[in-house]
Image (cartoon, rainbow, N blue to C red):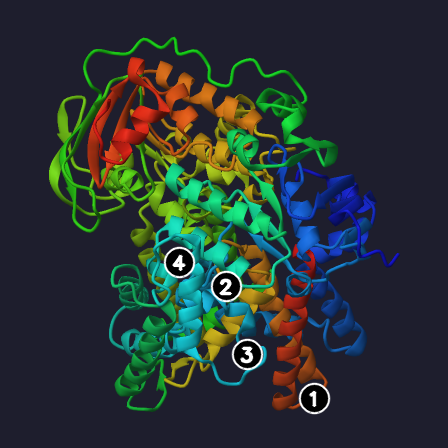
Amino acid sequence: MNLTIKEQLSSPGGVLKFVVKHNTIFIFILLLIFSALISDVFFTSTNLSNLLKQVSGIGIISIGMLIVILTGGIDLSVGSMVALLAVTFAILVNIVVLPLAILITLTIGFGLGSVSGYLVAYQKMAPFVATLALMTIARGLGFIYSKGSPITFKTPGGEFMSNFANNSTLGVPNIALVFFLIVILTMVMLRYNVFGRLIIAIGSNEEASRLSGIKVNKYKFLVYAISGALAATAAIIVASRTNLGSPNMGMAWELDAIAAVVIGGASLNGGKGTAINTLMGVLILGLIGNILNLLNVPSYPQQVVKGAIIIFAVLLQRFESK
Amino acid sequence: MQNSESEYRVEMTGISKSFGVVSVLEGVDFKVKHGEIHALLGENGAGKSTLVKILSGVHQKDSGQIKLNGQEISPKNTHEGQVLGISVVYQELSLVNDLSVAENIYLHKLGASKFWMNWKEITKDAQELIDSLGFKIDASARVRNLSIVQKQVVEIAKALSEDTKVLVLDEPTTVFDPTDTQKLFDNLFKLKAKGISIIYISHHLEEIIKIADSVTVLRDGVDTGSMAVSDTDTDGIIRLMIGRELKDLYPARTVEIGKDPIFEVKNLTAKNTLVHDVSFSVRPGEVLGIAGLGGSGRTETAKLIFGADKKKSGTILLNGKEINTNTPVSAVGHQIGFVSEDRKEEGVFLPLSIRRNISVTSFTSISNKFGFINVDNEYKNVVGLIEKLNVKTPSSEVNVSNLSGGNQQKVALAKWLSVDSKVIFIDEPTRGVDVGAKIEIYNLINEVAKKGVGVVVISSDMPEIMGISDRILVMYKGTFYGELPKEKFSEENILRYSIGKPLK
């Protein structure tokens, strides 16, 4: 409803309700404060920009995951796509000019996503199954084309990308800027564009959408294709950061992306979720990893904490809907 | 308070309940005797469903007292309610589609005592139960393959499979045709004779007068009193329900009907449903009624024309020109609208706001060529429709799931009013909708017709279809059996055609 923040806060139990409603942002802020208190290295520009660089790749595929989940689907192939497309980009950047390498990589990403989209939308395959198949195919292709070992950038074009990916503009890492730009575009699209409105409508009631004359299949197809193109974007970024493309990249990233979307309050049934909350979800996951690293916590306990945070966030959302 | 010889089976006193800041019930008293049919009435949103859900354990009361056979109870969940002998048949069907009829009926008992299931026995018991209700359904069939009428019967059988002392029926006949309704009533009378108390929620006042012993009317969460049905009549009940005198349920038709048909269907036959050789035409400004028994193919006809089902043969003409409506997308492209009978599953987007619901069909008029929406125009359009349809809501941003059935139906209609349609098919325009909202919807249908739209209304509600149509076509076994001009409208004539008999 159209209440101002002040009105929301002054209603009975208002503060609690406000916090619960915007729980993702509050968890994020709490984690920030906690991190700053616990470690004096945290609020250094090196650490923060490292954090942003680390989350940008996963962040971009999380946005793709979000729009797929909004339609009620899921895309398990994105992690493997990052690997295949990073390898593809590394190969291309060594043989063609940079803009062409970028363009072809994005097109292949869109094309692979289209395969999932075609299977889901027009062959009525369950999204989980279709993208699971694509996940194995993409990983396998990545190993085939790279012959199992990383491919390093060797051309000036590669060097340019590597510089771009590791430098900052106005203190913000360039690749984080790319991620933020994608978040903003998605936000605008979901709020003010017909495409965004329709995918949310499809996710909240597919049959009603069909009977409202919406081209349901077309939009379901498109979200997977876009998710593929975003996976390509993420692949270019992570490959450029490390100056190479490896078939081992993006391992289990699809799961982190799903986690980020869910922490951001989206419903796996579709129809509910926003880009800004997914951004928060991405940052929360990144922050946890970052602070635990600063505290020298080994990676296995880190996974336990991550899982616990997911449960906590989703329980809080249940509280909200009551 | 151990008085088991109480006059009343159920005594609910001073029941209050609110959800968040919305108060739904305020100090409601509701008492049901042994072996009576007690009608619970009220407009949508009056709190009937909530009251029943408190009795059965779905919701918990904020304050008040519930007694069953003189003993205080407070069921914390539906299971506790069932153990106490309170069974509810909800308006929203709650069956598991992938299980068989028998499994659904005994679902709540699965694993309760025995480790191994005796499927043969269970199927046999279920079959006997259904047979005893007088309906023909195979107990081993999958629920997915049943018609909506059959599903409702299974739902009732499920409620009766328990040792039921209080049976609650929430709008049980909305999907039934008159013959099925009569069968249900016969069953209710049998149950009543056995001493079972029946709470009957319905908007069909004629039904209430026919079967109920007493009636309690809720208005805005407060009970306006209970009385014996013999002490009142339809008008009296309506007065209590809406708190005002009811002049005319069906608005006068003053629309000038055009000469040439705006829309024609010739020999339309479906690929996968029983619909065959359907031909009819609608003229601009005309309200054409389609009547028939449940399962006669009325909804299937509309869905076939709208492109939601596959066609085998036949032609469709709009303004005399042949058009192709093989998908809903192409039908909408030809400015054909369709309001589904299944509001929650096919009509509205429950988790989305009113604004997002209404806008879904009208993006071409409120967005530019890049698909960006002019939000100012959108608000103007939506708020205008909310006012015009008198949707009761604090704002356009409220989720449709929070609206009452009548208001949800208005939103489903608004979706098609926000675009310029040439023909609109409205399937069961007022199913589960209260009297006040019904009148508003009828007025709306009139207004749409006045703009020169051809309106096709499908309805099982006989007074309704006679009240609003200019002409009625009656379906029987998948095709039109007969046509009734206005002067021949009568329940008897419609029924005769519905069962494939000529008029007298």
How many marks the image carries: the answer is 4
Q: Quadrant of residue B317?
A: top left
Label 4 and label 1: CA atoms lie apart by 71 Å
Label 2 and label 3: CA atoms lie apart by 30 Å
Q: Find out whether the residues at labels 1 and 2 contact each other: C-beta distance under 8 Å.
A: no
**x 58%, y 38%: residue:** B404
Counting residues from the start of the chain, the first of labels 1 and 2 encountered is 2
- Closer to the observer: label 2 or label 4? 4
Observer-nearest residue: B470 or A12? B470
Q: Which residue is mark 3?
A: B111
Observer-nearest residue: B291 or A78? B291
Label 3 and label 1: CA atoms lie apart by 50 Å
Q: Position of residue B428 (x, y in %)?
A: 40, 34
Q: Is residue B56 above or below residue B303?
A: below
Label 4 and label 3: CA atoms lie apart by 25 Å
Q: Which residue is mark 1?
A: A296
Q: Is residue B91 visible?
A: no
Q: Which residue is mark 4?
A: B131
**x 51%, y 67%: residue:** A59
Q: Which residue is mark 2?
A: A268
Q: Find out whether the residues at labels 2 and 3 contact each other: C-beta distance under 8 Å.
A: no
- Closer to the observer: label 2 or label 3? 3
Chain identity of mark 1:
A
Left or right for B480, reference B444: left
